[in-house]
Amino acid sequence: MSSLSDFLAEPRNVIVAGVRRDGRPHLSPNLFFWDGERFFISTTRVRVKYKIFSRDPRIELIIDDSTDHRYVRVSGTVEILEDIQSNLPMDRAIREKHGWQVGNDEELTASLVADNRVLLAVTPSKPSSEWSVLGVEA
Protein backbone atom coordinates (compact mmCIF):
# COMPACT_ATOMS: atom_id res chain seq x y z
CA MET A 1 0.00 0.00 0.00
CA SER A 2 1.42 3.38 -0.98
CA SER A 3 1.55 6.41 1.26
CA LEU A 4 -0.78 9.33 0.64
CA SER A 5 2.08 11.61 -0.42
CA ASP A 6 3.42 8.98 -2.86
CA PHE A 7 -0.06 8.41 -4.31
CA LEU A 8 -0.63 12.16 -4.83
CA ALA A 9 2.81 12.53 -6.44
CA GLU A 10 1.97 9.97 -9.14
CA PRO A 11 0.99 11.45 -12.54
CA ARG A 12 -2.76 11.04 -12.59
CA ASN A 13 -5.89 13.13 -13.06
CA VAL A 14 -8.02 14.66 -10.40
CA ILE A 15 -11.76 14.75 -11.01
CA VAL A 16 -12.99 18.21 -10.04
CA ALA A 17 -16.62 18.63 -9.00
CA GLY A 18 -18.45 21.91 -8.52
CA VAL A 19 -22.11 22.98 -8.45
CA ARG A 20 -23.66 24.64 -11.50
CA ARG A 21 -25.99 27.60 -11.01
CA ASP A 22 -29.01 25.31 -11.55
CA GLY A 23 -27.77 22.90 -8.84
CA ARG A 24 -26.49 20.15 -11.12
CA PRO A 25 -22.95 18.88 -10.50
CA HIS A 26 -20.18 19.64 -12.99
CA LEU A 27 -17.26 17.22 -13.17
CA SER A 28 -14.07 17.40 -15.19
CA PRO A 29 -10.69 15.62 -15.23
CA ASN A 30 -7.63 17.80 -14.70
CA LEU A 31 -3.92 17.65 -14.06
CA PHE A 32 -2.88 18.70 -10.56
CA PHE A 33 -0.05 19.20 -8.11
CA TRP A 34 -0.27 18.69 -4.33
CA ASP A 35 2.26 20.74 -2.33
CA GLY A 36 1.41 19.19 1.04
CA GLU A 37 -1.10 21.91 1.93
CA ARG A 38 -3.13 22.70 -1.19
CA PHE A 39 -4.02 21.16 -4.52
CA PHE A 40 -3.18 23.28 -7.57
CA ILE A 41 -5.23 22.74 -10.72
CA SER A 42 -4.70 24.60 -13.98
CA THR A 43 -7.72 25.80 -15.95
CA THR A 44 -8.69 28.64 -18.27
CA ARG A 45 -11.06 31.56 -17.87
CA VAL A 46 -13.37 30.17 -20.60
CA ARG A 47 -14.01 26.85 -18.81
CA VAL A 48 -17.24 26.22 -16.93
CA LYS A 49 -15.36 25.48 -13.72
CA TYR A 50 -13.84 28.98 -13.73
CA LYS A 51 -17.34 30.46 -13.76
CA ILE A 52 -18.58 27.99 -11.14
CA PHE A 53 -15.75 28.61 -8.68
CA SER A 54 -15.88 32.38 -9.22
CA ARG A 55 -19.41 32.17 -7.85
CA ASP A 56 -19.18 29.28 -5.37
CA PRO A 57 -15.82 28.15 -3.87
CA ARG A 58 -17.03 24.72 -2.66
CA ILE A 59 -15.25 21.83 -4.37
CA GLU A 60 -14.96 18.05 -4.26
CA LEU A 61 -11.93 16.19 -5.61
CA ILE A 62 -11.39 12.54 -6.47
CA ILE A 63 -7.92 11.24 -7.32
CA ASP A 64 -8.50 7.76 -8.71
CA ASP A 65 -6.48 4.72 -9.68
CA SER A 66 -8.98 2.29 -11.16
CA THR A 67 -6.27 -0.27 -12.00
CA ASP A 68 -5.37 -0.91 -8.35
CA HIS A 69 -8.71 0.27 -6.94
CA ARG A 70 -7.20 3.13 -4.96
CA TYR A 71 -8.64 6.59 -4.48
CA VAL A 72 -8.60 9.72 -2.37
CA ARG A 73 -11.64 12.00 -1.98
CA VAL A 74 -11.23 15.51 -0.62
CA SER A 75 -13.70 18.33 0.12
CA GLY A 76 -12.46 21.88 0.19
CA THR A 77 -12.67 25.45 -0.97
CA VAL A 78 -11.13 27.11 -4.01
CA GLU A 79 -9.17 30.32 -4.36
CA ILE A 80 -8.66 31.39 -7.98
CA LEU A 81 -5.08 32.58 -8.54
CA GLU A 82 -4.95 34.80 -11.63
CA ASP A 83 -1.44 36.32 -11.57
CA ILE A 84 0.56 34.32 -14.11
CA GLN A 85 3.99 35.40 -12.82
CA SER A 86 3.14 34.37 -9.24
CA ASN A 87 1.69 31.09 -10.52
CA LEU A 88 4.76 30.07 -12.57
CA PRO A 89 6.27 27.69 -9.96
CA MET A 90 3.02 25.74 -9.55
CA ASP A 91 2.21 25.76 -13.28
CA ARG A 92 5.70 24.37 -13.88
CA ALA A 93 5.25 21.74 -11.14
CA ILE A 94 1.93 20.55 -12.62
CA ARG A 95 3.43 20.15 -16.09
CA GLU A 96 6.66 18.51 -14.94
CA LYS A 97 4.79 16.05 -12.72
CA HIS A 98 2.85 14.89 -15.78
CA GLY A 99 5.91 14.63 -18.03
CA TRP A 100 5.39 17.74 -20.17
CA GLN A 101 8.29 19.65 -21.68
CA VAL A 102 8.00 23.06 -20.05
CA GLY A 103 10.77 25.29 -21.40
CA ASN A 104 12.10 28.40 -19.73
CA ASP A 105 10.03 30.95 -17.77
CA GLU A 106 9.48 33.17 -20.83
CA GLU A 107 8.15 30.25 -22.90
CA LEU A 108 5.94 29.05 -20.07
CA THR A 109 4.58 32.55 -19.44
CA ALA A 110 3.79 33.01 -23.13
CA SER A 111 1.94 29.70 -23.19
CA LEU A 112 -0.06 30.52 -20.05
CA VAL A 113 -1.01 33.96 -21.36
CA ALA A 114 -2.01 32.55 -24.76
CA ASP A 115 -4.24 29.95 -23.07
CA ASN A 116 -5.73 32.52 -20.64
CA ARG A 117 -4.75 30.22 -17.74
CA VAL A 118 -5.43 30.56 -14.03
CA LEU A 119 -4.80 28.24 -11.10
CA LEU A 120 -7.37 26.81 -8.76
CA ALA A 121 -5.78 26.56 -5.31
CA VAL A 122 -7.82 24.08 -3.27
CA THR A 123 -7.56 24.09 0.50
CA PRO A 124 -8.94 20.87 2.01
CA SER A 125 -11.65 21.41 4.63
CA LYS A 126 -10.24 18.62 6.85
CA PRO A 127 -6.76 17.31 7.63
CA SER A 128 -5.56 14.47 5.39
CA SER A 129 -6.09 11.96 8.21
CA GLU A 130 -9.85 12.57 7.79
CA TRP A 131 -10.03 12.30 3.96
CA SER A 132 -11.88 9.37 2.39
CA VAL A 133 -9.24 6.99 1.10
CA LEU A 134 -9.11 3.45 -0.21
CA GLY A 135 -5.90 1.48 -0.79
CA VAL A 136 -3.75 4.40 0.35
CA GLU A 137 -2.19 4.95 3.79
CA ALA A 138 -3.49 8.29 5.07
Image (cartoon, rainbow, N blue to C red):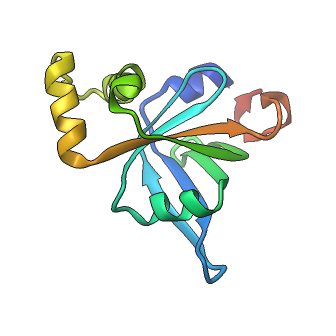
Is residue 29 in sight in this rendering? yes
Q: Position of residue 83 (x, y in %)?
A: 39, 33
Q: Is residue 136 left or right of residue 29?
A: right
**Residue reaching furthest to the bottom:** 22
- Is residue 9 depicted above or below 32 in this figure? above
> Which one is nearer the viewer's eye here, 95 or 135?
95
> Which one is nearer the viewer's eye here, 19 or 6?
19
Q: Is residue 14 left or right of residue 102?
A: right
Q: Position of residue 73 (x, y in %)?
A: 70, 46
- What residue lies at 46% left-to-right and 58% top-to-bottom? 50
**Residue reaching furthest to the top:** 104
Q: Position of residue 3 (x, y in %)?
A: 67, 20
Q: Is residue 91 left or right of residue 10?
A: left
- What residue lies at 40% left-to-right and 24% top-to-bottom? 86
Q: Quadrant of the N terminus?
A: top right
Residue 48 in which image quadrant: bottom left
Q: Quadrant of the C terminus?
A: top right
Q: Is residue 83 left or right of residue 69?
A: left
> Which one is nearer the viewer's eye here, 50 or 7?
50
- Is residue 119 depicted above or below 47 in this figure? above
Residue 126 in which image quadrant: top right
Is residue 69 in sight in this rendering? no
Q: Position of residue 18 (x, y in %)?
A: 60, 62
Q: How many marks?
A: 0
Residue 122 in which image quadrant: top right
- What residue lies at 68% left-to-right and 36% top-to-bottom? 123
- What residue lies at 38% left-to-right and 62% top-to-bottom? 47
- Is residue 58 depicted above or below 135 in this figure? below
